[in-house]
Image (cartoon, coloured by chain):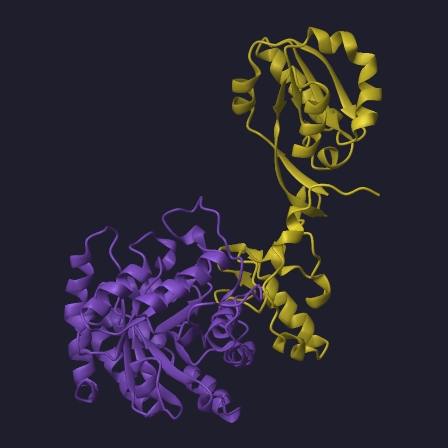
């Protein structure tokens, strides 16, 4: 899932101007992250109206990153959109850009910061799992990704700075290499680590288009 | 046999080596680095020039190395993977070799969040083990990381890296050292030793695998200058192990500087007789002037 976080309200206010403004959310990731579901759109509407900024309408797209579906769903909102000065999108960077594709002449505002590809670990808690590097190496590391989960993306073992299984840069973050090491040890497969992992092929990470 | 550097020669001859660290200035004044170098001249066989250590911007390691070379002192150029990708790193290896640098220490590098530019984008295109292998292949096989051939002269450098006997998980560290040797490490400088007992255990494991015959191990020594420094080392510097007894000695000392010096001296004396240790690496943070006395009192001065 794409993990997002709403920008600070003051920051959003600075970009919005006087309105009217149309609000767009997303039924998938942004809803699960409590960034841009129906509840968040209604809360945003209320907050903006309190600041005397008129809200012309709102919609939760299903999902915001589906260009053709967006066209279809937004057909019923032509009047509201025409009346709007700007569109505030509470979804990931992809959702924002898919909306821009349709309304490039209007001011489309990104109301959220897109953080990472991750999982819901607990209610309202999200953890990074993938950085879309284009070439999956998980099978070399027992299914734990050091590219995404080690701040130095170390491929050949721990950096030596971790302490009691925690990363040196934050005691709240697990050292993924400690985890990989323990997994391999438990499975009697530590010799896997003797293989020197070659420098990663980052050219795979710049793929810009895929057609099926 | 011809040696790539005098550090390699001295180690190969089996003499106990001293290396010392010189941190470049936070400015462009070459005199700053020359002054520091003059203080430690003759007190060590070779001198590490750090590469933006703890992710704080300083004069580049390569520039510092060239200044040292102009003073007829032997530099060890530290290279981290934090600030340059494989293109920049390989280019700097060629440049350094062209300018006379003969020792390179490959490090992954401290994370940028610890330094004075925490908003920087860390590169980490490769890690220290990959960097060792890349430079070894440039030197021995005449190829760049991509497989493309070097055309005009291969960099003739003696390769080292760091090792931390105190890192977690402890039982992984010897395997990790073996991997570094496989990648191309010819000498190792360890994390500062305060816990001699744990260091000895690490050395036991290393000897039992015969790794001390495959790589030259230089044990790190960092004299504690103050109680504050002891506290920082004990509680805040990742991967450092200051035992309670050492910490208490510093805390109870009437003169912490004197006590820190005494602890460092005792440590060096014990390391000198520890089988498999080929030398020491002194990092005297903001205390370079102590190095000449320290090596002299440790009975190492006459060897240099």
| Left or right: A90 in relation to B258 | right
Q: Is residue B75 visible?
A: yes
Residue B161 figure quarter: bottom left
| Left or right: B43 in relation to A46 | left
Q: Colour of chain B?
A: purple
- Residue A189 drawn at (x, y percent): 70, 78
Image height of B119 relative to A198, above or below = above
- Say which residue appears at 84% left-offset and 43% top-offset: A212
- Say which residue appears at 70% left-offset and 76% top-offset: A186
Image height of B153 relative to B54, above or below = below
Residue nearest the viewer, comparing A167 with B73: B73
| Left or right: B7 in relation to A149 | left
Chain letter, colour yellow in render: A
| Left or right: A36 in relation to B18 | right
- Residue B277 drawn at (x, y percent): 37, 87
- Residue A101 drawn at (x, y percent): 71, 24
Name of the residue lying farthest toward the front: B151
- Say which residue appears at 49% left-offset and 57% top-offset: B87
Quarter of the image with the N terminus of chain A is top right
Q: Is residue B225 visible?
A: no
- Say which residue appears at 31% left-offset and 77% top-offset: B281
Count of number-bearing discs:
0
């Amino acid at each position: 899932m794409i993990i997002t976080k709403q920008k600070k309200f003051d920051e959003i206010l600075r970009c919005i101007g006087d309105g009217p403004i149309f609000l767009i959310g997303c039924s998938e990731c942004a809803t699960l992250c409590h960034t841009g579901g129906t509840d968040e759109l209604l809360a945003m509407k209320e907050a903006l109206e309190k600041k005397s900024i008129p809200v012309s309408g709102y919609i939760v797209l299903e999902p915001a990153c589906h260009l053709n579906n967006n066209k279809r769903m937004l057909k019923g909102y032509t009047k509201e959109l025409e009346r709007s000065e700007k569109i505030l999108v509470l979804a990931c960077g992809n959702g924002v850009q898919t909306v821009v594709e349709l309304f490039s002449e209007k001011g489309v505002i990104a109301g959220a910061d897109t953080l990472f590809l991750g999982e819901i670990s607990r209610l309202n808690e999200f953890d990074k799992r993938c950085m879309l590097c284009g070439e999956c190496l998980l099978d070399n590391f027992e299914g734990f990704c050091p590219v995404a989960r080690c701040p130095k993306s170390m491929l050949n073992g721990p950096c030596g700075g971790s302490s009691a299984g925690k990363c040196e840069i934050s005691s709240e973050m697990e050292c993924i290499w400690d985890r990989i090491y323990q997994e391999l040890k438990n499975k009697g497969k530590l010799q896997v680590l003797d293989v020197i992992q070659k420098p990663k092929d980052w050219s795979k990470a710049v793929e810009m288009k895929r057609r099926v | 046999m011809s040696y790539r550097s005098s550090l390699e020669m001295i180690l190969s001859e089996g003499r106990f080596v001293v290396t010392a660290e010189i941190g470049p200035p936070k400015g462009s004044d070459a005199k700053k680095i020359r002054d520091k170098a003059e203080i430690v001249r003759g007190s060590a066989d070779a001198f590490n020039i750090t590469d933006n250590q703890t992710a704080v911007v300083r004069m580049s390691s390569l520039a510092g190395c060239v200044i040292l070379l102009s003073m007829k002192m032997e530099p060890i150029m530290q290279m981290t993977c934090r600030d340059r990708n494989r293109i920049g790193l390989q280019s700097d290896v060629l440049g350094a070799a062209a300018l006379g640098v003969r020792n390179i220490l490959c490090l992954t590098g401290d994370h940028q969040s610890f330094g004075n530019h925490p908003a920087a984008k860390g590169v980490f295109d490769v890690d220290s083990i990959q960097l060792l292998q890349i430079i070894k292949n440039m030197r021995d096989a005449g190829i760049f990381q991509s497989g493309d051939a070097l055309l005009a002269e291969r960099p003739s450098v003696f390769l080292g890296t760091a090792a931390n006997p105190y890192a977690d998980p402890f039982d992984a560290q010897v395997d990790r050292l073996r991997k570094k040797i496989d990648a191309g490490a010819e000498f190792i400088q360890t994390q500062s030793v305060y816990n001699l007992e744990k260091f000895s255990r690490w050395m036991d494991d290393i000897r039992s695998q015969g790794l001390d015959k495959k790589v030259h191990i230089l044990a790190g020594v960092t004299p504690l200058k103050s109680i504050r420094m002891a506290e920082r080392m004990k509680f805040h510097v990742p991967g450092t192990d200051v035992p309670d007894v050492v910490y208490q000695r510093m805390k109870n000392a009437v003169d912490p500087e004197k006590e820190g010096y005494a602890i460092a001296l005792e440590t060096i004396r014990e390391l000198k007789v520890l089988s498999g240790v080929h030398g020491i690496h002194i990092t005297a943070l903001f205390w370079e002037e102590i190095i000449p006395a320290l090596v002299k009192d440790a009975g190492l001065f006459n060897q240099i």
